[in-house]
Image: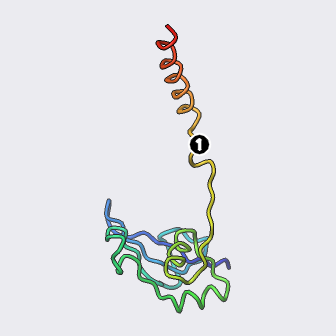
Amino acid sequence: MAVKIRLARGGSKKRPHYSIVLTDSRNPRDGRFLEKLGVYDPMLAKDDEKRVVMNLDRIKELMATGAQPTDRVTRFLEAAGVLDKKVRHNPKAAVPGKQMAERAAKKAARAEAPAEE
């Protein structure tokens, strides 16, 4: 059984509230879980200590036995000092898409045309 530490969404429309849970990776996002390990409230300010509350001792114990945290939970654990910060590199993030590149080329061509006349 592949066990994950991930977020389960709760709260109403436009008012999200997440639980950090231990679950089988085959279960749905908001479905059955094995254990609740903490909460995440994105509606609170970023510097509020109640924004992310986790049972760090239990999470360390579960990770030692093979539980894998998802990307978002990994970031929470990095911020808490449990995991080492991982260097992330996405070189394509700054590259414009195909349509945006075409628009930029047209705009540059229009800008050069009056200058030549």
Residue drawn at x 63%, y 51% as measured from the top left: 91
**Mark 1 belongs to which amino acid?**
Val
Up-down: is 12 above or below 62? above
Residue drawn at x 51%, y 68% as measured from the top left: 29
Up-down: is 10 above or below 99? below
Up-down: is 14 above or below 37? above
Q: Nearer the viewer, residue 68 or 51?
A: 51
Up-down: is 26 above or below 116? below
| Relative side of 66 to 23, left or right | right
| Relative side of 2 to 71, left or right | right
Residue drawn at x 32%, y 67% as measured from the top left: 43
The answer to which image quadrant residue 41 occupies is: bottom left
Q: Residue 32: x, y in percent?
A: 51, 77
Q: How many marks?
A: 1
Q: Read off the residue under disc 1.
A: 95
The answer to which image quadrant residue 10 occupies is: bottom left
The local crowd at label 1, few if under 14, some if 14 to 19, many if 20 or more residues have their Cα within 10 Å, is few
Q: Residue 27: x, y in percent?
A: 57, 71
Image quadrant containing the N terminus: bottom right
Residue drawn at x 55%, y 31% as measured from the top left: 99
| Relative side of 64 to 33, left or right | right
Element at label 1: loop
Query: In the image as oriented, which residue stretches furthest toward the top?
Result: 117
The answer to which image quadrant residue 38 occupies is: bottom left
Q: Residue 6: x, y in percent?
A: 53, 74
Q: Nearer the viewer, residue 74 or 87?
A: 87
Q: Residue 80: x, y in percent?
A: 49, 81
